[in-house]
Image: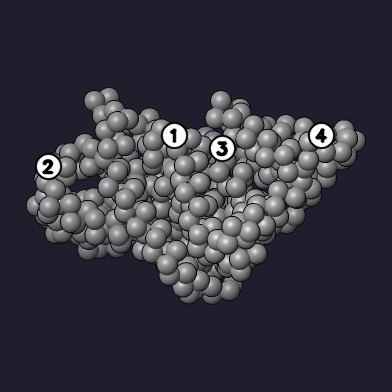
């Protein structure tokens, strides 16, 4: 078998094994080792595994993973999510569909300090869904807003997906963080516009459509500012330091983690038991991510050795397809993969293949990364996988709301995301203006 045939078979088997339930990292390592064995011999395969393990996570750059994970974990235990929702609800209380917009706004703010969509989905399912249902919104609309807005965690920096993409594509993580600001705010504003329109034009789906000034009766300007100050300060500290050039991404992660630690101490939410749980969970998540990066490094080396990325690039060039035709095909592939695989798996599998092709077409890898992440995010809320949807279901206290209800509720927001993706493709400057 030729190298191209081996690599194509490897990618197909990898997708099959992951879909059947094998851990992504294990599948990447096993298939890559077997492919290298078929290409050369067992000795080379063993040496490449050792080199991938040593080289992939020994770099100083990889310190960004545990630091941002630690910051997100600390923020999650100190009640910032509830306060953010209260402030957003108070600010938007007079608008039609204000509670839905408050959920989007608070999710966007929460995303700016966590970077993990699952965390946002779990937190706001317990905070926002009961409030929205209590004020007359339908259950489908309520869970749909939470599931859809949770994906902002992967687009608004800091983002775990951006870190993984930056490592795989050898692109600047700091630039990716900055590039995600405008697209993230654009998607949040589009969500709010959609909610406002649905509240007036689709009352059967949304439920109670009138503005509700009494939705947060106990809130005042002073209390809202007091609740909002900590999260705003933390966002300004991390993103302001990055954008102003004061911190590298790793330093921003360290400063953000320390800021979140101080915030948790000041709010008296961090007991010794909670601190230990935060540290253990940070270790679990960090090790899992770094193991995936190590496996992806071996996978990338295997693909380079087989010549598959170059062959695909030559094939596409031979067809006479332009850059946007290639991009359209790529986005469709990612959307299809999003229906059966999680977001990290998709990045690990496709990025090493398509980045050389994107470079051959002269595409900006920062813009390409933002487009990739938005396309991957759509998979977080589409059936049958939709991990954010299942997270919302697992976090619900109401058993009368089923998986089907959540998928139906999130459908309008999927269409909104597709429109946002088309805008980002058509206007690359939205992703690169701040970089």
Quadrant of the rendered structure where residue 141 is?
Answer: top left
Residue at label 1? 385
Disc 1 or 4, which lies upstream in sequence?
4
Disc 3 or 1, which lies upstream in sequence?
3
Mark 4–mark 3 Cα distance, whole angstroms, equals: 39 Å
Disc 3 vs disc 1: which is toward the camera?
A: 1
Label 1–label 4 contact, CB within 8 A: no
Residue at label 2? 204
* Element type at mark 2: helix
Q: Residue furthest front?
A: 319
Residue 4 picture location, percent across and down? 73, 43
- Identity of the residue drawn at 41% across and 53% down: 152
Disc 2 vs disc 3: which is toward the camera?
A: 2
Is residue 74 positioned above or below 157 on the image? above
Residue 418 can be seen in this image: yes
Disc 2 or 3, which lies upstream in sequence?
2
* Element type at mark 4: helix
- Identity of the residue drawn at 61% across and 69% down: 362
Mark 1–mark 2 Cα distance, whole angstroms, equals: 27 Å
Q: Quick one: 309 or 434, which is closer to the camera?
A: 309
Q: Residues within 10 Å of mark 4 (few under 14, many from 20)?
A: some
Disc 1 vs disc 4: which is toward the camera?
A: 4
Residue 301 picture location, percent across and down? 76, 47
- Identity of the residue drawn at 62% across and 45% down: 348
Q: Residues within 10 Å of mark 3 (few under 14, many from 20)?
A: some
* Element type at mark 3: helix
Mark 2–mark 4 Cα distance, whole angstroms, equals: 59 Å
């Amino acid at each position: 078998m030729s190298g191209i045939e081996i690599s194509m078979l490897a990618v197909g088997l990898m997708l099959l094994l992951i879909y059947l339930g094998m851990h992504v990292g294990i599948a990447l390592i096993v298939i890559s080792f077997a492919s290298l064995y078929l290409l050369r011999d067992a000795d080379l395969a063993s040496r490449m595994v050792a080199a991938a393990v040593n080289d992939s996570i020994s770099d100083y750059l990889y310190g960004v993973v545990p630091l941002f994970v630690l910051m997100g974990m600390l923020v999650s235990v100190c009640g910032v999510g509830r306060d953010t929702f209260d402030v957003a609800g108070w600010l938007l209380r007079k608008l039609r569909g204000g509670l839905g917009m408050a959920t989007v706004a608070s999710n966007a703010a929460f995303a700016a300090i966590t970077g993990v969509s699952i965390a946002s989905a779990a937190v706001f399912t317990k905070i926002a869904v009961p409030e929205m249902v209590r004020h007359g919104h339908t259950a489908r609309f309520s869970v749909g807003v939470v599931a859809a807005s949770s994906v902002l965690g992967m687009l608004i920096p800091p983002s775990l997906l951006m870190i993984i993409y930056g490592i795989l594509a050898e692109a600047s993580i700091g630039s990716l963080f900055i590039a995600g600001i405008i697209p993230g705010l654009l998607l949040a504003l589009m969500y709010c516009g959609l909610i406002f329109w649905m509240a007036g034009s689709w009352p059967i789906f949304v439920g109670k459509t009138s503005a509700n000034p009494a939705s947060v009766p106990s809130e005042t300007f002073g209390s809202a500012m007091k609740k909002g100050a900590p999260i705003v300060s933390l966002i300004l500290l991390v993103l302001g330091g990055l954008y102003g050039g004061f911190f590298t991404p790793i330093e921003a992660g360290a400063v953000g983690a320390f800021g979140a630690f101080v915030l948790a101490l000041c709010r008296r939410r961090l007991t010794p038991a909670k601190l230990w749980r935060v540290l253990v969970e940070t270790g679990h998540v960090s090790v899992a991510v770094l193991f995936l990066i190590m496996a992806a490094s071996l996978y990338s080396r295997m693909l380079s050795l087989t010549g598959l990325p170059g062959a695909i690039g030559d094939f596409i060039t031979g067809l006479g397809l332009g850059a946007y035709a290639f991009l359209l095909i790529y986005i469709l592939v990612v959307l299809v993969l999003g229906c059966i695989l999680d977001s990290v798996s998709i990045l690990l599998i496709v990025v090493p293949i398509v980045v050389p092709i994107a470079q051959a077409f002269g595409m900006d890898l920062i813009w390409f990364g933002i487009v990739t992440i938005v396309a991957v995010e759509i998979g977080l809320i589409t059936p049958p996988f939709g991990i954010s949807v299942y997270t919302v279901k697992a976090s619900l206290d109401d058993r009368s709301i089923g998986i089907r209800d959540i998928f139906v509720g999130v459908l309008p927001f999927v269409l909104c995301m597709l429109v946002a993706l088309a805008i980002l493709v058509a206007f690359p400057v939205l992703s690169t203006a701040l970089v």
